[in-house]
Image: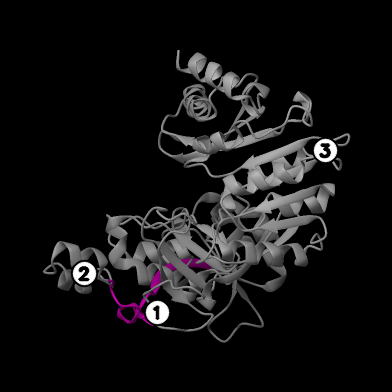
């Protein structure tokens, strides 16, 4: 039986709701008991013959991960002979006559001796995957897909893995030296700051007890990430961060030039804003509703020496946009470059398009001066064309007019049959420009008609 089977059986009498959240204590697994013993056949020969033996017998070697094929002799002859470990698949017996022809001839030629060799592997020998396959029941899959944010590993465990979460986390910090903290997501993002509830499962930073719910200021989640040639500092329990968006951050920022200005409406801790300023010297106006995101955004601007180029704020995105347009009341912020407006709030960005409606004075803003909008959104379909159609339908409904010439880019698969897209387009003058009351009534009737 497996090491945790008895503990598992003791949990079976728990009520279902409690059983789901109960965790097998990490003390229930003893590392020294997680070991394996295997007997193999070895060829004991002189050290000077090892090189030729490795060539001649290359198809018959043990070739086991993290186990050398050549070991010292164990019978007091370590200085005078070595043992070449052979694969049990090809060499099942130490009887010379039962060896494959190629082996038998070499053994005779070098006056070698077939010996039995015992392989003893302790917990330290096994990989993360190997250790958990020995520890977990056969019907519980080893978590193989997880996000790392600096020294923090972020799991999203399935229901049947929940009971073993402390064991999984402990093996993870044992086997991955860079990982010091392990957290598990407890639910979807439900608050306006895009931060989800998490549970700390392993903590080698503060060594506080686990499991525990993540609370504001938990030092175990204070971490740094290097991405896009920049350093990003954050407390993962207080701000939104997704390492899987690294490629998208690079893709969009690569389209900017030094003459461009960037308005980042949902900036977070700066994955778009900081590289835009650092690599292209863009003037950036970065906003986020979460005060802790603004705190780390400003910290990251200092760390990356772009605080003179990035202007931060902490307000509703609609208020931020109105403020930026108001500050451009005499001249549009455009020299030779473009104005980019990033809307990275995939759950509801299309519904924020109404913030652009009738905000721009046509006496100041030429059609080509209006922002290039980069709108991120989800849609439940695995067909990118359908996703684009539905996302833009929502955006057009909010803006109040058709949006032509859309360039859509599939960012990633969020879940089975759910895509994240970036839809880029020029803000239509039809909706952007301020109108007289009569024009507004006519336009509304036209849209509603």
Q: Residue at x 33, y 82 (%)?
A: 27
Q: Is residue 30 magenta?
A: yes
Quarter holding the N terminus is bottom left
Q: Disc 3 on helix, strand or loop?
A: loop
- Checking the image for residue 31, the label placed there is 1
State which region is magenta. 23-42
Label 1 crowd (10 A; few <14 / some 14-19 / many >=20): few
Q: Is residue 92 above or below residue 219?
A: above
Asked whether residue 30 is in view, the answer is yes
- Between marks 2 and 3 in the image, the one whose residue lies nearer the viewer: 3
Q: Are marks 2 and 3 in contact (CB under 8 Å)?
A: no
Residue 344, image x, y percentages: 58, 44
Residue 264, relative to residue 51: is it above or below? above
Residue drawn at (50%, 57%) of the image:
193
Marks 1 and 2, the one that precedes in the sequence: 2
Closer to the eye: label 1 or 2:
2
Q: Disc 3 versus disc 1: distance between alpha carbons? A: 69 Å
* Residue at 75 percent of width and 46 percent of height: 327
Q: Which mark is residue 141?
A: none
Q: Find residue 263 and report its horizontal and vertical position in percent.
A: 70, 45
Question: Considering the numbered disc 2 on the image, is that residue within a helix, a strand or a loop?
Answer: helix
Which residue carries the number 3 mark? 331
Q: Label for residue 8?
A: 2
Label located before the other in sequence (2 or 3): 2
First-in-chain label (3 vs 1): 1
Residue in the foreground of this view, choosing between 350 and 401: 401
Does 384 sit above or below residue 86?
above
Quadrant including the C terminus: top left
Q: 154 or 370, which is in the foreground?
A: 370
- Res. 161 image quadrant: bottom left
Count neighbours of disc 2 (C-alpha within 10 A) and say few if under 14, some if 14 to 19, many if 20 or more: some
Q: CA distance from mark 2 to mark 3?
A: 69 Å
């Amino acid at each position: 039986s497996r090491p945790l089977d008895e503990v598992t059986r003791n949990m079976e009498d728990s009520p279902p709701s409690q059983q789901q959240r109960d965790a097998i204590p990490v003390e229930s697994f003893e590392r020294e008991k997680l070991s394996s013993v295997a007997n193999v056949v070895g060829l004991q020969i002189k050290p000077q013959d090892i090189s030729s033996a490795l060539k001649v017998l290359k198809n018959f070697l043990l070739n086991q991960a993290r186990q050398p094929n050549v070991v010292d002799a164990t019978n007091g002859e370590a200085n005078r002979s070595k043992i070449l470990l052979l694969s049990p698949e090809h060499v099942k017996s130490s009887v010379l006559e039962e060896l494959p022809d190629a082996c038998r001839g070499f053994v005779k030629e070098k006056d070698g001796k077939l010996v039995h060799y015992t392989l003893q592997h302790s917990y330290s020998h096994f990989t993360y995957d190997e250790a958990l396959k020995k520890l977990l029941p056969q019907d519980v899959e080893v978590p193989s897909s997880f996000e790392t944010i600096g020294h923090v590993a972020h799991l999203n465990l399935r229901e049947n893995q929940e009971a073993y979460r402390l064991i999984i986390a402990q093996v993870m910090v044992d086997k991955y030296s860079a990982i010091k903290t392990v957290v598990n997501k407890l639910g979807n993002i439900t608050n306006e700051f895009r931060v989800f509830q998490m549970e700390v499962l392993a903590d080698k930073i503060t060594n506080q007890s686990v499991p525990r719910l993540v609370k504001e200021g938990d030092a175990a989640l204070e971490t740094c990430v290097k991405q896009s040639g920049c350093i990003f500092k954050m407390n993962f329990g207080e701000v939104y961060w997704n390492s899987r968006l690294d490629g998208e951050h690079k893709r969009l920022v690569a389209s900017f030039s030094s003459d461009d200005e960037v308005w980042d409406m949902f900036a977070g801790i700066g994955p778009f804003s900081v590289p835009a300023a650092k690599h292209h010297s863009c003037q950036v106006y970065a906003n986020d509703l979460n005060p802790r995101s603004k705190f780390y955004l400003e910290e990251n601007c200092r760390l990356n020496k772009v605080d003179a180029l990035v202007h931060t704020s902490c307000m509703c995105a609609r208020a931020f946009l109105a403020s930026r347009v108001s500050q451009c009341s005499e001249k549009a912020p455009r020299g030779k470059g473009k104005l980019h407006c990033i809307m990275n709030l995939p759950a509801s960005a299309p519904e924020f398009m109404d913030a652009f409606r009738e905000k721009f004075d046509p006496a100041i803003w030429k059609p080509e001066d209006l922002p290039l909008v980069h709108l991120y959104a989800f849609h439940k379909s695995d067909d990118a064309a359908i996703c684009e159609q539905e996302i833009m339908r929502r955006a057009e409904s909010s803006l109040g007019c058709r949006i032509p010439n859309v360039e859509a880019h599939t960012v990633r698969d969020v879940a089975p049959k759910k895509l994240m897209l970036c839809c880029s387009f020029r803000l239509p003058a039809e909706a952007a420009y301020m109108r007289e009351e009569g024009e507004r009534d006519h336009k509304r009737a036209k849209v509603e008609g």
